[in-house]
Amino acid sequence: MLAIMRIVVGFFFLWTFLDKTFGLGFSTPRQMAWINGGQPAQGFIKGVAVNSPFGSAFELLANPIGDWLFMAGMLGVGIALTLGIGLKVSAIAASALMVSLYLALWPIGTGGTENAATNPLVDLHWVLSLSTVLFALTRAGDTLGLGTWWSRLVGDSWLR
């Protein structure tokens, strides 16, 4: 069951990358696609971080480098989780990315607004972050993935 969950979470990250890159019309319209000049991280940061007490820190990432870091993180984590390789690295990267997005959104401060979070403390970002850590700790990539093969290449190092 963990292997299936790992693949689903991996596809979640991979789909985010694909939709933001090509504007598949779900959360990203075609005209806002990265390949059409869209700014995935900049648009997010400028749109939500203004309500976060950490907004000024996130403004440092509201540039093309921030876009590349965000998109590389989504692609790398998505591929790693889907294939079941590099789960330790992907757990660290996904957790850093998800905690950053949580702090930028700052759902604690949205109460009583039209953008209010369903739960101001625990949201999808925490679930995704903790899931990736669980996958790494349980070696969920060995089942229905390339984790066993990958471990023969890299051993039990941090690349596992």
Image (cartoon, rainbow, N blue to C red):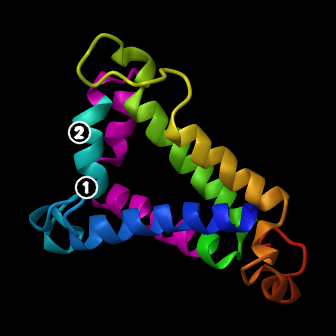
Q: In which quarter of the image is residue 50?
A: top left
Label 2 amino acid? Lys
Q: Where is residue 55 in the image (x, y as percent from the top left)?
A: 35, 29
Q: Is mark 1 on a helix, strand or loop?
A: loop
Q: Is mark 2 on a helix, strand or loop?
A: helix
The residue under label 1 is 27
Extreme residue in the left direction:
31
Q: In which quarter of the image is the N terminus?
A: bottom right
- The dot on residue 46 is 2
Question: Mostly what secondary structure, the magenta segment?
Answer: helix
CA gap, disc 1 and disc 2: 17 Å
Left or right: where does residue 36 sit relative to residue 67? left
Is 130 within the magenta? no
Q: Which residue is drawn at 78% across and 60% down?
A: 136
Please provide percent x and percent y for residue 128.
58, 48
Tell me where the magenta segment starts and ends, as one range.
Answer: 50-79
Residue at 24 percent across and 60 percent down: it is 26
Give residue 71's position: percent from left, percent from top. 39, 64
**Above/below status of 126 relative to 27:** above
The quarter of the picture where residue 121 lies is: top right
Of residue 5 and residue 13, the one placed in the foreground of this image is 5
Q: Earlier in the sequence, mark 1 or mark 2?
A: 1
> What's the amino acid at mark 1?
Ser
Residue drawn at x 48%, y 23% as measured from the top left = 119
